[in-house]
Amino acid sequence: MHVTHVVELGRRVSLGVLAGAIAGLVACGIGGRLFMSALAALNPDVAGIKSDDGFTMGQVTLSGTVNLLFVTTVIGAVAGWCGSPCADCGSVRRGGARSACLWRPCS
């Protein structure tokens, strides 16, 4: 691989990871927290009940919110990496084909 191909690959993968992280943070993290708050408001009779995971339903905590935002951002970043286009072929590879595209020699 030429240096320019490596730089282009790094740029494209970085943009994919950044876009995925932002989408995960906004759509899943913030959107998920708003959706859970709406569900809690619509079901006040279950507020205060412990879930199977040990969480108190209807209670919004800072640690729970930070955990949700972190996990969804990481998942979004991984999804952005898997869906980012290859530098040499320009196509979008998914799943196991990602590694073949990254390591295929340039012709």
Image (cartoon, grey):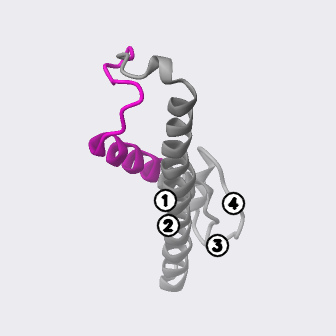
The C terminus lies in which quarter of the figure? bottom right
Circles 1 and 3 in contact, beta carbons < 8 Å: no
* Left or right relative to 19: residue 58: left
- The residue pinned by badge 1 equals 21
Badge 4 amino acid = Val
Q: Secondary structure at mark 2?
A: helix
Between the C-alphas of marks 1 and 2, the distance is 5 Å
* Left or right relative to 69: residue 90: right
Badge 1 amino acid = Ala
- The residue pinned by badge 4 equals 92
Mark carried by residue 88: 3
Badge 2 amino acid = Leu
Residue reaching furthest bottom?
4
Span of residues in magenta:
51-75
Circles 3 and 4 in contact, beta carbons < 8 Å: no
Instruction: Please count the marks in the image.
Output: 4
**Is tag 4's residue or tag 1's residue first in the polypeptide sequence?**
1
